Amino acid sequence: MAGIRPYRSTPIFDQDTLPSALRARHDTKAGVWGLIRIIEGELRLTYLDPLSEIILTVDQPGLILPQQPHFVTPLGPMRMQIDFYDQAPTL
């Protein structure tokens, strides 16, 4: 598992540059895991199926399963990046 690496990463977003598409309901494609990494601040990750929330921090990344509907909400100033994997990453 130590050799699992993302095949793509987003740019680093802050509370102002976070795309509106990530703030609204969306999901990853089949066979794609997303790992939200917080660089600074906090971000609320809302899973829609099943409905739950988690606060992401520098020490608490957020895992998105393939095709899992979700959205994110910045909680003040923050910086974050999403890594995409073709198999389940280790946290």
Image: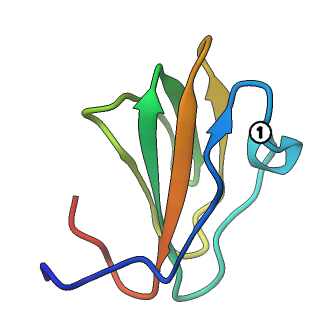
Farthest front residue?
11
Q: 30 or 16, which is in the foreground?
A: 16
Q: Which amino acid, mark 1? A: Arg
Q: Which residue is drawn at 43% across and 35% down?
A: 39
What element does badge 1 sit on?
helix
- Among the 4 quarters of the image, the one containing residue 86: bottom left
Q: Position of residue 74 (x, y in %)?
A: 64, 24
Q: Which residue is drawn at 58% across and 64% down?
A: 68
Q: In which quarter of the image is the N terminus?
A: bottom left
State left or right for residue 1 relative to residue 72: left
Q: Can residue 55 be seen at all in this image of the molecule?
A: no
Q: Where is residue 26 in the image (x, y as percent from the top left)?
A: 75, 58
Q: Position of residue 45 (x, y in %)?
A: 54, 37
Q: Residue at x 25, y 33 (%)?
A: 59
The residue under label 1 is: 23
Q: Which residue is drawn at 52% across and 88% down?
A: 31
Count of numbered marks:
1
Q: Quadrant of the C terminus?
A: bottom left
The colour scheme is rainbow
- Among the 4 quarters of the image, the one containing residue 29: bottom right
State left or right for residue 70 relative to residue 85: right
Q: Position of residue 24 (x, y in %)?
A: 81, 43
State left or right for residue 64 relative to residue 75: left
Farthest right residue?
20
Counting other residues with Cα less than 10 Å from the Cα at mark 1, is it few (<14), some (14-19), or many (20 or more)?
some
Q: 14 or 67, which is in the foreground?
A: 14
51 relative to 11, above or below? above
Q: Can residue 40 be seen at all in this image of the molecule?
A: yes
